[in-house]
Image (cartoon, rainbow, N blue to C red):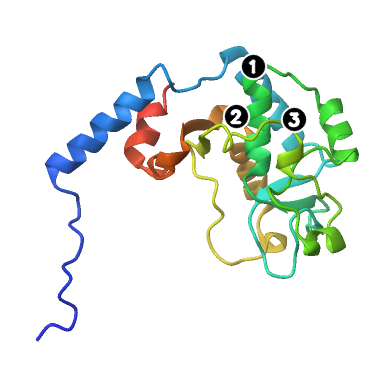
């Protein structure tokens, strides 16, 4: 007798179901209710994030949790670059500023960091208060997209795979992660109640050329 009677999920999905997902993705990608960035502002942020990524005096914000390090804590990479672990808050922060058509300079970014005005976490923990240099919460900076019913998603995946410490990862890979993570042009919104929709390859493909 089979001890695991539950059948395996079909791969690929049945054509009729897959077709409905394609139609749903296309509907949301083209829908007038989906917020979109101003193209010139998005280009400004692409250039800004690129400049930030190669400026050695500014930290790289990395979306990752790691045992032994608090979010907002400065980690010294072997390259000499400072690394700061965060949740998705910096992405939401940059998207909200870009949507409001803000065009900060690299000098402004430096000032924001010095004044601890770049959010690194949604919730500031006791560990952060004890260990971190940066303790800005997204809840006290700009409007929270979650509170407005939106979830910020990424077109190109930003997750760092594997368990290696950020200190052991190639700095080029970390810079690439940072750019994909922070650039608003790599982001799109879905309704928070349908947050999982943003993980579907059908939707990512549908918004790829937007």
199 vs 175, left or right, is: left
Residue under the image location 50 percent in, 38 percent down:
153
Q: Earlier in the sequence, mark 1 or mark 2?
A: 1
Kindly state the secondary structure of the residue where label 1 is placed.
helix
In the rendered image, the quadrant that contains the N terminus is bottom left
Kindly state the secondary structure of the residue where label 3 is placed.
helix
Compared to residue 209, the image places residue 20 above or below, namely below
Q: Mark 1 near mark 3, Cβ–Cβ under 8 Å?
A: no
Residue under numbered circle 1: 41
Q: Position of residue 178 (x, y in %)?
A: 65, 42
Q: Earlier in the sequence, mark 2 or mark 3?
A: 3
Question: Distance from label 1 to label 3 (Cα)?
Answer: 15 Å
> Which one is closest to the eye, mark 1 or mark 3?
1
Question: Within 10 Å of the Cα at label 1, are there few (<14), some (14-19), or many (20+) other Cα atoms?
Answer: some
Residue under numbered circle 2: 184
10 vs 47, left or right, is: left
């Amino acid at each position: 007798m089979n001890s695991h009677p539950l059948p395996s999920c079909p791969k690929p999905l049945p054509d009729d179901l897959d077709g409905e997902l394609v139609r749903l993705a296309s509907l949301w990608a083209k829908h007038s209710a989906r917020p979109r960035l101003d193209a010139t502002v998005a280009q400004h942020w692409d250039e800004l994030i690129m400049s930030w990524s190669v400026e050695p005096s500014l930290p790289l914000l990395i979306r990752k949790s790691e045992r032994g390090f608090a979010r907002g804590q400065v980690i010294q990479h072997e390259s000499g670059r400072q690394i700061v672990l965060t949740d998705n808050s910096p992405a939401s922060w940059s998207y909200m500023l870009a949507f409001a058509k803000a065009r900060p300079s690299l000098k402004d970014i430096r000032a924001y960091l010095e004044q601890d005005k770049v959010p690194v976490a949604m919730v500031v923990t006791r560990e952060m208060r004890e260990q971190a240099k940066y303790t800005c919460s997204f809840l006290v900076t700009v409007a929270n997209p979650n509170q407005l019913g939106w979830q910020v998603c990424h077109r190109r995946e930003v997750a760092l795979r594997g368990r290696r410490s950020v200190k052991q990862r190639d700095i080029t890979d970390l810079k690439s992660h940072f750019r994909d993570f922070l650039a608003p042009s790599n982001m799109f919104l879905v309704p928070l109640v349908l947050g999982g929709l943003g993980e579907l390859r059908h939707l990512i493909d549908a918004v790829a050329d937007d």
